[in-house]
Image (spheres, helix red, strand yellow):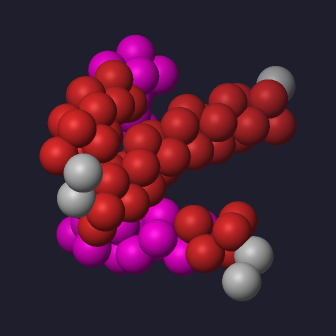
Amino acid sequence: MNVVIWFAERMDEKLEANSHKNGWQDCSDKWLLNRLRQETKELTKAVESGKIDRIISEAADVANFAMFIADNARVAADDA
């Protein structure tokens, strides 16, 4: 299996699990970056725990917040 597709599926699972929350489009970059840092700390703890499922889940969270920042930048550039 292609690792990018596999990981994108993990990211999508996390997004679906949190679909009850508001989207990221109205979040500031500063807020999103702070959340990314928090998620990175959670990933660090997951790696230290050695629990594979937790590592994968937290890595997907980190990737999603990075994607949110990139998506907001893309939209801002398109609007400019």
Identify the residue at the far top of this view. Answer: 30
Picture quadrant of residue 56: bottom left
Choose between 24 and 79: the one closer to the eye: 24
Report x, y in % for residue 45.
20, 36
Q: At which x and y percent is residue 72?
A: 60, 36
Q: Which residues are magenta?
A: 8-34
In this rendering, the answer to whether 59 lies above or below 28 is below
Q: Is residue 15 magenta?
A: yes
Q: Residue at x 22, y 59 (%)?
A: 51
Q: What x and y, as percent, mark residue 18?
A: 26, 66
Which is nearer the eye, 12 or 78?
12
Please say whether residue 51 is visible from this viewpoint: yes
Q: Position of residue 55 (x, y in %)?
A: 32, 54
Q: Is residue 19 visible?
A: no
- Looking at the image, is 47 positioned above or below residue 33? below
Q: What residue lies at 64% left-to-right and 36% top-to-bottom?
A: 70
